[in-house]
Amino acid sequence: MIPVYSDPYGHDPRVDRIATLRSAAADDAPSPLFELAGALLAEGKVEESLLLHARSALAGHDGAQVEYGRMLLFGIGCDPDPQLALGWLAQAESQHHPVASYWLAWVAMGSVLLPRDERMNQRLRVAVNHDHPPALRAAALHYGRRPGAADQRACIQLLDRAASRGDLVAALLLAERLQRGEGCPAQPQAAATWRARLRARQVEPLPPTVAPAPRFEGFPPGHRDPAPLALEDALHPPPARLLSTEPRVAQVDGVLSSDECRLLIAMAILNDPSRGAVVPTLRIDPAQEDLALRVLQLRLARAAQAELAHAEAIQVERRIPGSPDWRHRDYLAPDDLARDHPDAGDRRRTLCVCLHEPDAGGGHEFPFGLLETQAIAGSAVVVDNLMADGHPDPYSMHASIAVERGEQWQATLWLRERRYRPF
């Protein structure tokens, strides 16, 4: 952790700043209230921050309306209230706040509170045009899946715009593309410059992940401009290939691009407080998801014939030689099910997608099906945990095959029988 400056007299500059902001907000002007609320949230004083965001929002501050809506959406400092959150985000959008448009597109991706329609793309374009870094990142990864040269250039340009505005994830992804010449001529010096900037922020480069290019049906050849944004492309994943009927196991090749594999690894690393220590698994809470991560999870869910709203929080795992590889089944014991959204039903399917291939070993084994799968970056294995009648399938037992050399990164998405997420 970067040390906080302190002087020999014991003054804490953070306390002094809060005191200054409190003084400025004493007359309840919306902008000082908003600034104070943000500072308090950064200090972990979420309940007071929520109240001050609400006061500033009621006074008409559009930025406070966005942040108050976000806190209501995820229950930060309060019980979640998604409908009230949508009202505040819509109010901020009516005042042309681009971040409100971004969050409304984020919500619509789940197709629970808002329809998944063309307004998603319109809202994302608004946020991109105002250089909101998570929107730039989402658009970049969308274009990065497409094979056209214009789309690939757009991906690089959008990542550069986001990275130049301090987005660490975009900088990590951009450095990988520049190093390998993906979507542009190889630029190792530019990649080294970005990596040096990241190291100054205590962020190490990503593992060298390269996934096979996704297939994209119906792509118009020879176009000069990037194709229009179409987030609904995630509704049409590559086809699954059946590997076994008992247990029922399928494989979906090319479901994630290299950028998307790297995104999941980057999100796991940046949300890991140990920054670089070997952590067996890391759960990415929906409140930490950006729009790009929502899009790829929707594609994963659809590849398993489910909806994003049926998915538990995605989990990212790093495996090295010596990591445990015990056999297990993913359907829930009755007590576990009773504690965790019993109305959503059991874990109908498990989807495991390889994000980074080890040098040797890795993959999954299914002892009852006498089946082993390889670890292929960007490809997913889909396992039915329940039989057709809804009863647990004991033949669904599986295990990770030991990593012999290098490291394997994988993500797991458990999909319930019914809706698990509130949005």
Image (cartoon, rainbow, N blue to C red):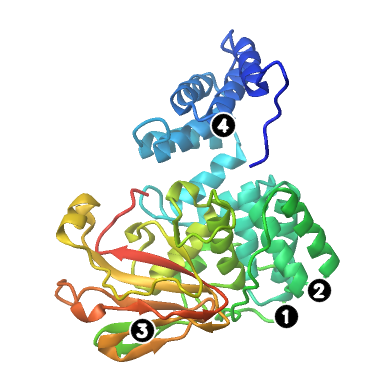
Sequence-earlier tag: 4 or 2: 4
Q: Nearer the viewer, mark 4 or mark 3?
A: 3
Which residue is identified by label 2? Answer: 186
Residue density around tag 3, few if under 14, some if 14–19, many if 20 or more, within 10 Å: many
Which residue is identified by label 3? Answer: 365
Q: Is residue 329 above or below residue 291?
A: below
Q: Nearer the viewer, residue 62 or 326?
A: 326
Three-letter residue code for mark 4 = Ala
Q: Disc number at residue 76? A: none
Q: Which residue is drawn at 57% across and 77% down?
A: 406
Which residue is identified by label 4? Answer: 42
Sequence-earlier tag: 3 or 1: 1
| Figure quadrant of residue 93 | top right
Percent of width and height locating residue 263 = 58, 62
Asked whether, in this view, residue 158 is left or right of residue 343, the answer is: right
Q: Nearer the viewer, mark 2 or mark 1?
A: 2
What's the CA distance linking mark 3 and mark 1?
Answer: 43 Å
Q: In this view, does 69 lie above or below 221?
A: above
Residue density around tag 2, few if under 14, some if 14–19, many if 20 or more, within 10 Å: some
Which residue is identified by label 1? Answer: 222
Three-letter residue code for mark 1 = Gly
Three-letter residue code for mark 3 = Glu
Q: Which of 304 and 279 is in front in this view?
A: 279
Three-letter residue code for mark 2 = Ala
Sequence-earlier tag: 2 or 3: 2
Residue lying farthest to the bottom in this orientation: 370
